[in-house]
Image (cartoon, coloured by chain):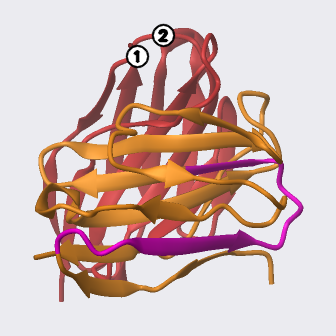
Chain colours: A red, B orange
Amino acid sequence: GIQVEQSPPDLILQEGANSTLRCNFSDSVNNLQWFHQNPWGQLINLFYIPSGTKQNGRLSATTVATERYSLLYISSSQTTDSGVYFCAVEPADSGYALNFGKGTSLLVTP
Amino acid sequence: EAQVTQNPRYLITVTGKKLTVTCSQNMNHEYMSWYRQDPGLGLRQIYYSMNVEVTDKGDVPEGYKVSRKEKRNFPLILESPSPNQTSLYFCASSLSSGTLYGYTFGSGTRLTVV
């Protein structure tokens, strides 16, 4: 099956710092999404981005489908950004399930 | 507000006592699915449904049942829960699958089986 690798696995930032999270995937995809899992366990959809670039406030994402990677940028981080960030992809040849990476655990300190 | 609603949010039950976790979406989505999340194993798909009366197994279907009698509802049934089904469960929906649409997830159901 498709492999989804996220890096770094853990990240500690001071409030106000910027960061880049990476997602590599091993095969062609129909769908790529970035999620934030907050400390209460909820999965919040950040971006649906199978290709191209999108921005939403302090967050932006870029997917280069031909090179099979996606980047999530967090600027001016806040303590509320803490949690786990997941990249999930839907393979182009079997579009019935999202395959999740192991996530990047982010802690933003005051 | 467009959303996927799961109930209950938290549930503690005993081994063997049948339970149902409900999932409802108000977006007229055709595609719905269930995932479970476990430490070290990540999120794995249990069952999915492409439309009313159409369901199929995901990666970890053993011990679970689902039904899709109405478009908006997709309940997850544990006929005889066991402790290894203690997990965080998510329901998700999408307008379609595999064709350029994103998934919306419910808030999760934390199940403990003792």
Q: Which residues are magenta?
A: B15-33
Q: Which residue is mark 2?
A: A27
Hey, what amino acid is under mark 1?
Ile
Q: Is residue A22 visible?
A: yes
Which quadrant of the figure has residue B88? bottom left
Q: Position of residue A11 (x, y in %)?
A: 15, 57
- Label 2 crowding class (10 Å Cα cut-off): few <14, some 14-19, many 20+? some
The verdict on residue B25 being magenta is: yes
The verdict on residue B89 being magenta is: no
User: Is label 2 or label 1 in front?
Assistant: 1
Q: Which residue is mark 1?
A: A2
Query: If you read the primary sequence from the N terminus, does the residue marked by circle 2 or circle 1 appear first?
Result: 1
Quadrant location of the C terminus of chain A in the rendered image: bottom left
Q: Is residue B98 above or below residue A74?
A: above
Hey, what amino acid is under mark 2?
Asp
Residue at screen point 20% across, 59% down: A105
The front one of A50 and A54 is A50
The front one of A38 and A78 is A38
Q: Position of residue B23 (x, y in %)?
A: 62, 70
Left or right of A66? Residue B8 is: left
In the image, farthest residue toward the right: B28
Secondary structure beneath label 2: loop
Give yes or no for contact between labels 2 and 1 (Cβ–Cβ under 8 Å). yes
Numbered badge on residue B55: none
What separation in Å lies between label 2 and label 1 (alpha carbons)?
A: 6 Å
Left or right of B24? Residue B110 is: left
Q: Is residue A102 above or below residue B85?
A: above
Residue at screen point 18% across, 73% down: B113
Secondary structure beneath label 1: loop
- Label 1 crowding class (10 Å Cα cut-off): few <14, some 14-19, many 20+? some
Q: Position of residue A26 (x, y in %)?
A: 40, 12
